Image (cartoon, rainbow, N blue to C red):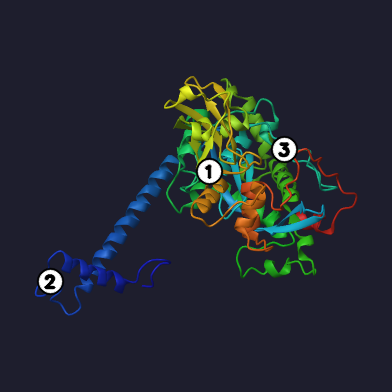
Amino acid sequence: KPRKKGGPYFAEIHEAFLQQCKEVGIREDQYPLNRKVGGVGVLRSYLIDRQKFFQAEKEKNSKSRAERDLFPPMSPLDEVQVDGHNLDVGLVVSEKDAYGQDVLYEISRIWIIVVIDSFTRCVLGYSIALGHTYDHIDLLQAIFNSLAPHQRPMPIIAGAKYHKDGGFPSENHNAAWRTWLSLKLDNAMAHKARHVQEILSTRIGCLCDFGPPHEPNDRAIIERFFEYLIQNFSHRIVGSTGSNTMDELRERLAPTHANRLKLLITLEELREVVDIVISDYNGRPHSGIQGHAPLALFNAGIADDALPPDRVVEDVRREREFLMEHQRVRVKSSAQYGGAYVNFCYLKYRNSNVLRSDFSGVEVSIGFLRRDISSIWLFDEDGTMIGILTPPSPWCDHPHSLTLQAEMQKALRAGQFEFQRGESILHAYRRHKSSGNTITRKIATSLLKNAGSVSDIPLPSSKKQPAVPVGIPRKLTKGFII
């Protein structure tokens, strides 16, 4: 039989088998080395039997799961499913260059992580993640967005409106911060991260059902929602990449204009459109729930609850506290480095008003956000925040991720990169990632995810939101969106 993708040929397995026979001391006049074909038939039969055994175990596990599924969720938030999907849409980011002119950078396709209620088919929340794949912080962001009161993106597309019957459950005060009983998810590395398990067990208090590997039908509800998203959104946008390289949609919806980037949807436009599509989905009749609208069914279900619901405690209802990771470190002190400090991600974080020299040798707890470690928080034994620690300049001057700092520090230590005088983190990372003025999609995506900007001149945080354009661009008319 032909080998599976990435697996060895049977001849390679047989050769390795004979080699191991020699290593354990089997002589040339003993079986299987004394046979002309080297016992190839027996080895093949053994492997076939083992394959049948594992297949039977897999079917047995599937049957046991089917028996457990005979007790489906009976009310909202009994069971919730979460998963990520790679959107098949070409995207650009619009930023300002050093001369104040608009520049478009194309980025790689992005992920959408969705949290959906199994009983009502209602989408509780979502997050949009950049990069080749999403990590556990993107997953936790989606979980937080499904719990916190929903905030609609700033409107930038003229004429784009939400359906009056749509919305998100957390927009209802009674449904915000309500936790669920069980969570279904697959065996992705981001889902099994230690930080994710800690958040789910201590701050939400739900059971995790990872299910068998390579069995998407075990989470059929969320997979069906992704199919809806494909048919009604991602495969109707100019610049859609289709399901595969042979999909005719790639050529049919490919921009033919000389300046093709101007016809692609921007990341901010995508955020608004995705929010509208999901909001309207929650308000539309659903055939899987006998024609009811998911949001209306959800609200009716929680209104009938006789017992008070479980909610996230108020201490972790802010995004910072919800996503924060904690780590134990030891305080060190050195006159050469200006007093007491703690080592974190190759840098010395200090604050003379908080860390004194008599703290040397004491273990303390720090909290940090992986998306921004330009500052970290110091906590006492009771969990009370003492103060904020910062690294030396220029690391404290601009928000940056843990990935960026670790990557650049390793390059500095290996002699592969050096800072220029007065250079900012953003400019240095862009110079480190790109050669010359070439900015590829992969580099632009990495810059945007880890530094918050692609251009050398970051947008100031106090910049006002762009006004709604007067005219509707052709690429954003109704026929191109839905």
Label whose residue precedes the other's in the sequence (1 or 2):
2
Quadrant in the rendering for residue 289: top right
Residue at the outermost right position:
470
**CA neighbours of label 2 inside 10 A, class few (<14), some (14 to 19), many (20+):** few
Q: Which of marks 1 and 3 is in front?
A: 1
Instruction: Give the amino acid at mark 1.
Output: His
Residue positioned most to the bottom? 36
In the rendered view, does 433 fall on the left or right side of 173?
Answer: left
Q: In this view, does 174 lie above or below 408?
A: above
Q: In the rendering, at what x and y percent does residue 93 appear?
A: 73, 54
Question: Which residue is at a point 62% across and 25% down the rendered structure image?
Answer: 304
Q: Which of marks 1 and 2 is in front?
A: 1
Q: What residue type is labelled 3?
A: Gly
Kindly identify which residue carries mark 3.
Answer: 167
Question: Which residue in the protein does label 1 denote?
Answer: 136
In front of the other: 315 or 274: 315
